[in-house]
Amino acid sequence: MKTENIVRILREKLPEIAIRQEEDGSIRIEPSSIRDLALQLRNTRELSFDFLVCSFAIDYLEKMEIVYIFHSYLHNHQVKIRAWIDRGNAVIATIEDLYPTANWHEREMYDLFGVTFKGHPDLRRLLLPDEWEGAPMRKDYTHENLVRRPENK
């Protein structure tokens, strides 16, 4: 299915949400809309996006972007959803309860980018030690931020 058809269906189902098709074929939404949109992607029969392929963060220094790629096994189509979030207050709602694969994706973004997923049932570090300070994948992170661990003797 073409992105413009997906956008049309979503606008019919969610008229209160600003949904914009980007030039690259992705769909741009406000971060506050992610749960409603994800629910419609999954539950609308014509769309049937039953799998979250991946989600990731991109740091642009002045703001951050969260990107989701959904796939429908029934219809064999994909869609990319994008949302800008405030870098200084990097918070967006979880979709882990709607798409279980989001669990580790969200934990990775929390760990490496410092993004908080509101409502996530187990938001804790995934790759780094608990005492790690900062978000090493942010563009302004420097090696001076590293936590020094005492040598094992």
Image (cartoon, rainbow, N blue to C red):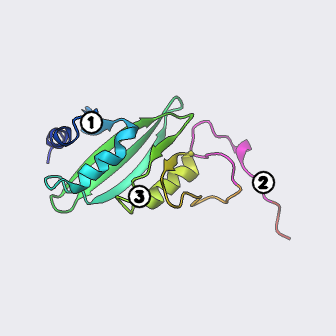
Spot the residue most to the top.
Answer: 62
Pointer 1: residues within 10 angstroms few (<14), some, or many (20+)? few
- State the residue at coordinates (26%, 34%): 16
Judged by depth in the image, the label closer to the viewer, 1 or 3, is 3
Q: Which mark is residue 24?
A: 1
Q: Where does label 3 land, which residue?
A: 96
Q: Could you tell me which secondary element the residue under label 1 belongs to?
A: loop
Q: Is residue 137 magenta?
A: yes
Mark 3, secondary structure of its residue: loop
The image's mark for residue 87 is none
Residue 81, horizontal then vertical, whole percent:
32, 43
The residue that label 2 is drawn on is 148
* Residue 110: % across, % down: 54, 51
Residue 101 location, x and y as percent?
Answer: 39, 62
Q: Residues within 10 Å of mark 2 (few under 14, many from 20)?
A: few
* Type of the residue with mark 1: Asp
Which residues are the magenta region? 132-149
Q: CA distance from mark 2 to mark 3?
A: 33 Å
Between 45 and 108, the one lying in front of the other is 45
Main SS, magenta region, reads loop
Q: Amino acid at mark 2?
A: Arg
